[in-house]
Image (cartoon, helix red, strand yellow):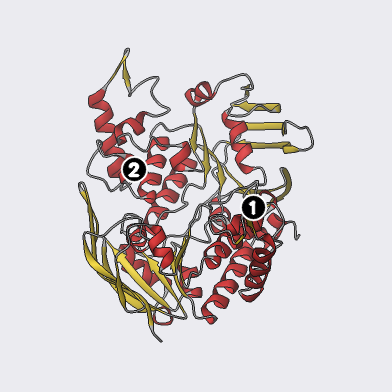
Amino acid sequence: MSVAVELRHISKRFPGVIANKDVSMSVETGTVHALVGENGAGKSTVMKILYGMQRPDSGEILVNGTTVHFKNPNDAIEASIGMVHQHFMLADNFTVLENVILGSEPQHGITIDFAAARTKVVEMAAQYGLEIDPDVLVEELGVGQRQRVEILKVLYRGARILIFDEPTAVLVPQEVDDLFNALKGLRAQGMAIIFISHKLDEVLRVADDVTVIRAGSTVAEVKSKDVTARQLAELMVGSELPQPSTHGDTRRPEITLALKDVSIPTKSGSRDLISHVTFNLHAGEVVGIAGVEGNGQAELVEAIMGLRDYTGVIEFSAANINDLSVAHRRDLGIGLIPEDRQRQAMMMESPLWENRILGHQRGKPVMNGFVLDMKTIMTDTKSIMEEFDVRAPGPQTLAAALSGGNQQKFIVGREMSKAPSLLVASHPTRGVDVGAQGAIWEELRRAREKGMAIVLISADLEELIGMSDRLLVMLRGVVTAELDPAKTTPEQLGSAMTGAS
């Protein structure tokens, strides 16, 4: 096989941080090549360099044997490189066809030649096993179908080298199977695929070769058939794979959270975003909320936190909190790990110490009377960084300078530091490495044992099953099932989530 992409001794330094130090990897045509490493190891940086989003300080990039120098992503696209981002970049109010051709519209005189575009997209979808209705609005599609649109976008622009950034993060098992079948089709067509993931079992299932990065440097390049998940984990972080699990029954008699007939109607009144949701959550209990993204989980979180108007009643520690603000609810002892860390949990251009006090700035240890207690804030920020292994030079470091996984660890540490009675954890380990996953799971286990009530929302079905005492399944805004995690497999849970069972 010929070499599609070769990175030679790539190095990249940011102020106070060495992101990449002598990274090398070689990707052959007609193969799936996985790139793995713990958070902050430099995976995202080296892929941004390959896609033209950043320039290396030193090193060389070769595409099909020719040295290239990319100034921006357009240069990478011209070199037949495409990137499917973890967070989809689609216009919901456009059709599939309009999203695929956006920015590369075929012209017929002064108008767009939609007929030619539709023919090309339909043929391409069939060729690569990515069949989808070109005329349906993206807002009507599920997560797996949206991902197909993203793949078709890069293929439409002529990509032969595809970068997938955490592509299974929000997919249920059946959708993962569909994606992997599509990747096999692309590989059979001679594509070179770079697959970035934290899920080592998936890496071994889909990849031909694996490059492992640790602390910014390449430490190994292996054939997937020659290693186990545990061996890969040890190469990445020097430890064995952690397992999501809880031990024993820690549920206490008192009810921490009660939802009674809670609904969120749409403005049009045509349907409810969530409809007649009722459940109790005891102290020392973890209730997992399972559902394909877009089925009401996010709206449920917003109702509990007071971010949305709703009907029905929400009680916290037996008191009705319907009329309380978000700030008042947090002051009572409700913590939140939001779904989107960058949009909902951090001020990206502010230092970590400012992010430490975000949402906690109304009392001790942050305030000393009417002024900020800077000495305590700095000490507290450092302790969170040490306890949760947040890798950054110090409290003055800007949040934007941290990798996504280190941002996530900082958010979890901030919320746990106040020991809330109720923690609403929305995708708490999304985008973190196996070592950080284990640390976060251990914190949740300890909090549960101490009596914290936890609402856990996750796209990782093994995490939901392993960490939950009870599972509630949401479909189209309705709780459609309650399952016993001890008797439920990921496949059964995935079927319940999609309405197949």
Disc 2: CA contacts within 10 A as few (<14), some (14-19) or many (>=20): some
Q: Point out residue 95 in the picture as x, y percentages from the top left corner.
A: 67, 53
Disc 1: CA contacts within 10 A as few (<14), some (14-19) or many (>=20): many
* Tag of residue 497: none
Left or right of 449 in this view: 143: right
- The residue located at (38%, 19%) in the rendering is 363
Quarter the N terminus occupies? bottom left
Q: Point out residue 13 in the picture as x, y percentages from the top left corner.
A: 22, 54
Q: What residue type is labelled 2?
A: Ala
Mark 2 highlights which residue?
A: 400
Q: Which marked residue is nearer to the observer: mark 1 or mark 2?
A: 2
Q: Point out residue 345 in the picture as x, y percentages from the top left corner.
A: 44, 37
Q: In this view, does 472 lie above or below 109?
A: above
The quadrant in which residue 265 appears is top right
Label 2 element class = helix
Residue 256 in view (yes/no): no
- The residue located at (35%, 78%) in the rendering is 222
Q: Distance between the residues labelled 1 and 2?
A: 29 Å
Q: Point out residue 60 in the picture as x, y percentages from the top left corner.
A: 25, 69
Mark 1 highlights which residue?
A: 292
Of 438 and 431, the residue lying toward us: 431
Q: Is residue 253 above or below residue 144?
A: above
Q: What residue type is labelled 1?
A: Val
Quarter the C terminus occupies? bottom right
Residue extending furthest front?
A: 109
Label 1 element class = loop
Residue extending furthest bottom?
A: 1
C-beta proximity under 8 Å, tags 1 and 2: no
Residue extending furthest top?
A: 370
Of 277 and 42, the residue lying toward us: 42
